[in-house]
Image (cartoon, helix red, strand yellow):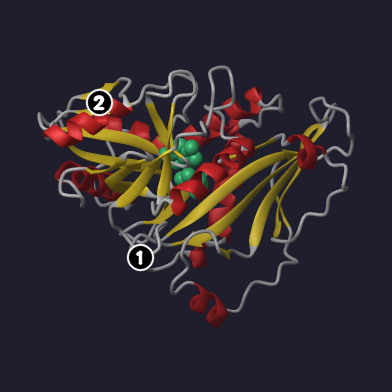
Amino acid sequence: PTFRFDRSATPVAANERAARLVDPGFGRVFTDHMAVIRYAEGEGWHDATITARAPVTVDPSTAVLHYAQEIFEGLKAYRLDDGGMALFRPEANARRFNNSARRLAMPELPEALFLQSCRQLVQTERDWFPQIEGGALYLRPFMFASEAFLGVKPSSEYLYMVIASSVGAYWKGGARAVSIWVSQDYTRAAPGGTGEAKCGGNYAASLLAQSEAIRQGCDQVVFLDAVERRWVEELGGMNVFFVFDDGTMVTPPLTGTILPGITRDSIIRIARDQGITVREEKYGIDQWRADAASGRLTEAFACGTAAVVTPIGEVAEPAGRFTIGSGGTGQLTQRMLDALSAIQRGRAADPHGWLDRL
Ligand code: PLP
Ligand code: COI
């Protein structure tokens, strides 16, 4: 299907839009339109539209409300220094979306439709880019089981939508090193579970651990593996990297329980392009503590679409806290952030063809 453009939307007035874009924060300011595509068994994907952003009315028995058959993506469109616009690696999000769909027994969305829905929405919302440091349009494609039926089985109907949010920095207070709490009682994903799928249920399961992190005076939670409770996996919404005094980096391998981050993949490639050794290998919490104390570990950072690259300054456990390096932003962390941002803003060469210019 090609997208029908529903012109009935009444856009927010320009002065009101400007006011909302001054300090948008993350995920609170939404644009005027959304993309919608429907799926029904036997019919396939149909009724692709760009329409006015509006509430979705569902029956109380709708499958997603009971069994959480839902997946989503997160990607950004950037305003480039030359005035153009680009999505960052949207094909990678399209592929991951379909990997998630398969795991949740949902129909795959043709990649071309995913890309078209994102591109068309950004084109439509070109006036919603915040002209601030770190500003972007954050796209949230998602799909949910929309059949009204209480039986436990894959839904026969689905709704795919893309909404857009004008965003600034993910963290309140701007760029600074964050503190993380090592979750003791809760894990995020077990082998054979849904850890590598981007499904809402994973985030529901992480919220209590995140609340505990806040209670412990930390910004974020970091999860250990569910089997040995030893290997560092990832944060609630970010992958993690470790930097050593010999200039090498380590990040946990994609063993099925962590989300294969597109930022993670980009940083591995940028680092290797720069001649930095990156090992995808397991790293234990005991080793982390010991390496931080001995100075072998000099930096750690978290990364993801929303938070980009965020230094980890401090790690907290029941037994106490330990500091990473100076507790601030390490050199290599800054270098990765700068290199990635430069590509995303069209300020540096794009050797891997990551920008999808619109
Ligand atoms: N890990 C989790 C649990 C996430 O939610 C995210 C964000 O989407 C990431 C890692 C980072 O993935 P990406 O770099 O593709 O945004
Ligand atoms: C991301 O898109 O970077 C996310 O991590 C999703 C959400 C947790 C903000």
Query: What residue type is disc 1 on?
Result: Gly
- Judging depth in this view, the residue of 349 and 284 nearest the camera is 284
Q: Residue at x 25, y 31 (%)?
A: 288
Q: Residues within 10 Å of mark 1 (few under 14, many from 20)?
A: few
Sequence-wise, which precedes: disc 2 or disc 1?
Answer: 1
Can you say whether 24 is above or below 243 in the image? below
Whether residue 32 appears in this view of the structure is yes
The residue lying toward the viewer, choosing from 236 and 10, is: 236
Query: In the picture shown, does residue 34 fall above or below 270?
Result: below
Q: Quickly name the residue at label 2.
A: 287
Residue at 44% in and 47% down: 213
Task: Classify the position of the N terminus by image quarter.
Answer: top right
Residue shown at the point (37%, 24%) measured from the top left: 231
* Image side of residue 89 versus residue 312, left or right: right
Amino acid at the residue labelled 2: Gln
Q: Position of residue 5 (x, y in %)?
A: 70, 56
Residue 259 percent coordinates (x, y): 48, 31
Q: Which residue is mark 1?
A: 173
Element on which disc 1 rests: loop
Foreground tag (2 vs 1): 2
Relative height, residue 164 to residue 192 (above, below): below
Q: How many marks overall?
A: 2
- Judging from the image, what secondary structure is the residue with disc 2 in? helix
Structural distance between the alpha carbons of marks 2 and 1: 31 Å
Quadrant in the rendering for residue 16: bottom right
**Picture coordinates of residue 248, whole percent (x, y):** 16, 28
Is residue 212 left or right of 275 when viewed as pictured? Answer: right
